[in-house]
Amino acid sequence: MARQQQLNVPEIASGAELTTQEYVYKRLRYAIMVGAFPPGTNLTMRGLADALGLSPTPIREAIRRLSSEHAIEVKQNRRMIVPRMTLGRFEELLALRVTLETHAAERALPYISDIIIDKIECIDRKMGPALENDDLDLLTILNQEFHRALYTVNPNQVSMPVIESVWLQLGPFQRQVIEDVKDYYKIDRHIEILNALRSRDVAALVIATESDIREGMSRSGRQRLTRVQPAG
């Protein structure tokens, strides 16, 4: 049984338009998406309330919503846990990422401008120092910002909520996988994505996006999971 861990819940902007319930939901959702809670983390209402400095009331609704998104598992005895990853679930989520994000990248390309490419490149330039400093939390956040900045260029896109749902389910495990990033991510696929955007080359963009996703997670993720469970 995983022991209760001290919770680190990253801050998010809390605009005046957000209710307390919505703020709690968005903050906990963000924390899970960027991997602030490792897989297997036990959660309690008291622990979350203490971490957020709030009463349990708005937290209950956030837990209900996150449970429906498969980001938190609520047991019959009311125990709450960040789900552990299995090999089968990982393969399914990885395949979904590839399908959804290559689609989103392809559909965004007609709306790309040089200004947008410069913005995306600016995000990418921040990732190098984060990696050199082993700031893996920041690296995770920047990686998501890089992809989100590309996909949301399409003014007609409806895929981002679905993509973020996959990120949410992968987040805790992906944060562990990224610890090995220097060992397996040898080619900078973000540079290839940027080059494909500049040349408006849709085929190259799709290939680079898929390679980025697979090389960023596939090999290391499988290795981590097959250490503790058989592939078949």
Image (cartoon, rainbow, N blue to C red):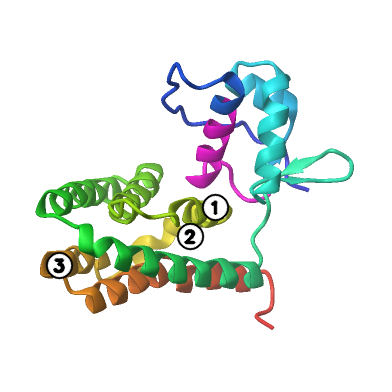
SS class of the residue under badge 2? helix
| Contact flag, marks 2 and 3 (Cβ < 8 Å) | no
Q: Nearer the viewer, mark 1 or mark 2?
A: 1
Residue located at (21% from left, 51% from top): 120
The outermost residue toward the right is 77
**Residue closest to the eye, 138 or 204:** 204
Q: Is residue 227 visible?
A: no
Residue 21, position in %: x, y?
A: 61, 24
Residue bearing mark 2:
177
User: What residue range appears in magenta?
Assistant: 24-41
- The residue identified by callout 3 is 195
Task: Determine which residue is flagged by label 1.
Answer: 165
Give, as a three-letter code, the residue at label 1. Answer: Ser
Q: Which badge, 1 or 2, is on the more N-terminal residue?
A: 1
Residue 18: image location, x then y, percent = 50, 22
Q: Tell me which amino acid carries mark 2.
A: Val
Residue 62 vertical placement versus 152 (above, below): above
Is 35 magenta? The answer is yes
Cα–Cα span, label 2 and label 3: 26 Å
Measure how far apart labels 1 and 3 are at the Cα level: 28 Å
* Residue under the image location 69 percent in, 72 percent down: 229
Mark sitting earlier along the chain (1/3): 1
Q: Quote the CA–CA distance across marks 1 and 2.
A: 18 Å
Q: Is residue 37 above or below residue 114?
A: above
